[in-house]
Amino acid sequence: MDHPPAVSDVKKAFKRLCRTYMRLQRPPPAKEMKTIWKFKKHVDFEDFVLWKEQVGIKRGVMFDEDGTIIFEEWPVRPHDQIIDEFNSQFVTQFKSIYTNTPHYPLWVNDGTTGSSPSF
């Protein structure tokens, strides 16, 4: 006879997987996902949404209709070379109309060094 797991155990496993996902920026391995998948009958959508908010993850985690929790692939950030090329073309075209005026705009190129993910 199966005994339902404690809600705190399921919640702890989910939060651990979410933190691993955000730290490594890739879905957890299937071996680690089995811990949460075996609890899928005991997790409902309201719990999932509440736990997701508590961890602070907004995207990348989905709740399937049968109760399976799925982590999406982390989006790949653009290469710095592409960003540099865009910035050089944009800045040249944008700033040229303000040359020799008191409204010369300041443009800062951060590249992919920001702390926020791009999704």
Image: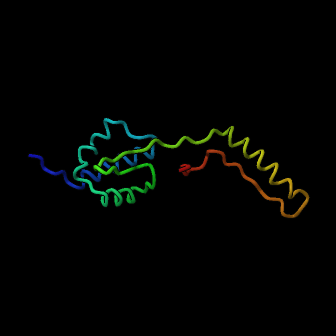
Residue 98 vs residue 45: left or right? Answer: right
Above or below, 33 relative to 3 = above
Q: Which residue is the extreme one toward the bottom?
A: 102
Above or below, 118 relative to 26 = below
Question: Residue 102 appears in which quarter of the rendering?
Answer: bottom right
Residue 59 vs residue 70: left or right? Answer: right
**Residue 35 image position (x, y, % from top left):** 27, 42
**Which residue occupies 27% across, 44% down?**
37
**Residue 16 image position (x, y, % from top left):** 34, 47
**Which residue occupies 31% across, 35% down?**
31
**Residue 41 image position (x, y, % from top left):** 22, 50
Question: Residue 47 appears in which quarter of the rendering?
Answer: bottom left
Q: Which residue is the extreme one toward the left?
A: 1
Residue 2 vs residue 106, the one in the foreground: 2
Q: Which residue is the extreme one toward the right?
A: 100
Question: Residue 44 appears in which quarter of the rendering?
Answer: bottom left
**Residue 95 image position (x, y, % from top left):** 82, 54
**Which residue occupies 66% across, 40% down?**
80
Q: Which residue is the extreme one toward the front?
A: 65
**Which residue occupies 40% across, 49% down?**
61
| Colouring convention used in this rendered image of the protein | rainbow
Residue 80 vs residue 13: left or right? Answer: right
